[in-house]
Amino acid sequence: MSFPTYFDLPHADRSGLAEQIAAQRRRVAERLATVRAVVLVMSGKGGVGKSYLTAGLARGLAPLLPRGVGVLDADLRSPTVARLLETEGPLAVLADGVRPAVDAAGVKVMSTEFLLEEGHPLAWREPAQDRFLWRGALEVGALREFLSDVAWGQLDLLLVDLPPGADGAVELGALIPDLAGALAVTLPSEESRRSVSRTMRAAASAGIRLLGVIENMSGYRCGRCGELKPLFPGDAGARLAQEFGVPLLGSVPFSPGRLTVDPALTARILDLVA
Amino acid sequence: MKFLCLDCHAAMEFVARQEPGDGTFGAAFTCPNCGRSIALLANPMETQLVGSLGVKIGGRTLDQPPLELVRSKLLGKDGAFASPAPADQPGPPAWSAEARDRLERVPSFVRGMVKKLYADYARERGIREITPEIMDRARAELGLEGM
């Protein structure tokens, strides 16, 4: 039997899938057209304080950027930024988009923290078998909708707090038009350096501009003498900066409690996105 | 995806979509020349694979509502989304820089609760911006000494 092939038929594709995928990308681009700069905040493994730094930077930058700052918590499975910024739902749904939560400094926030039951994992309505087949697509789809369907409005900066690892950076790098770049957060240790190096290399390979490195928990301030003392051995921040030819933007001491970031670091980030 | 009528070598036309609610999906197509009809029947796995992309087989007839995929697929908590406030109800009050600094000094484990108390106080009284003076007034009226 012989019959025409797909391309022999001049008719439009009736499934409309390709057009819908293209429309999804257009929707992201249209929404982000009012956001001057989108910056990813990434790390290698978890526990480096990336979300804490993201929240602190957003708080520090908000008064300095007249059109405002937003934070998208892209760590869907383990969201923390919303709580750090003391924001909460419910989120209002309007025809033109979902209104983000707003913190006390005016930072706009979107996170699965607003959507999940307290203490419950990220879960989807799905057939019980073979979940591994579509989980990734659902999670990327959720991030796409957080970008396109949240009414971010006019913003000078949207910080995207990524989950640990390289996948988030690569996926969002492909989805966000005119991405300003990515900040890498590391601990001083060699283990962290190796892990963050992989993530930075993956991001660079995907064409994402590396804006710089922030070394977090670079010692602690002694409560008695006020001297800065080492917390982890190593100089991962400086070594990563040298390896990738990017600036070491700051070394942040461990300071539990207040959500503040050194004004000098804030100023360097401001220069990068200005 | 295209459907071909083998008798006519013509592209069949999409007629109807069916989602019975059991996780499966059906779509009917008809040949514009001979009128022959067929139905594509997808099992739950196939339906889920396509649905995970946030697309509709056969195309969309209505605009995509905000967070359609998240709201339809995520097992979230009740009340995560709210209807918009009526136009005559103002949004949350703003915080002045001085008031924010003062709020920062509240111990973190009670800060969220304290912030809500002040915000509710301001909202109930139609106050658009929370300042240290408003916080003092709220403390006196609500008995929030030390907050």
Image: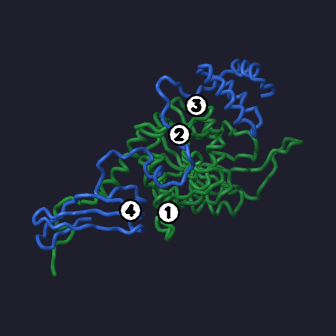
> Left or right: where does residue B14 sit relative to residue B81?
left
Q: Are marks 1 and 2 on the same chain?
A: yes
| Depicted B22 relative to depicted A85: above or below | below
For numbered disc 1, what is the local secondary structure?
A: helix
Residue A135 in sight in this render: yes
| Secondary structure state at the residue bearing disc 2 | strand
Q: Are both tags, 4 and 1, on one chain?
A: no
Three-letter code, disc 3: Leu
Residue with the mark numbered 2: A91
- Secondary structure type for disc 4: helix
Question: Which amino acid type is marked by label 4?
Answer: Val
Dot 3 and dot 4 residues touching (CB under 8 Å): no
Q: Nearer the viewer, mark 3 or mark 4?
A: 4
Under mark 2, the amino acid is Leu
- Say which amino acid is labelled 1: Arg
Residue corresponding to mark 3 = A64
* Residue receiving disc 4: B50
Task: Determine which residue is flagged by label 1.
Answer: A135
Q: Chain of mark 3?
A: A
* Image chain in green: A
In the image, residue A17 lies at what x, y percent? 32, 58
Q: Secondary structure at mark 3?
A: helix
Q: Residue furthest bottom?
A: A1
Residue at point 69%, 29% (across, down): B117
Give me the chain letter of mark 4.
Answer: B
Task: Please report whichever mark, 1 or 3, sits nearer to the chain's N-terminal start.
Answer: 3
Q: Going by the image, does A203 lie left or right of B96?
A: left
- Left or right for A253, reference A28: right
Q: In the displayed image of the protein, which residue is found farthest to the right?
A: A224
Same subunit, labels 2 and 4: the answer reads: no
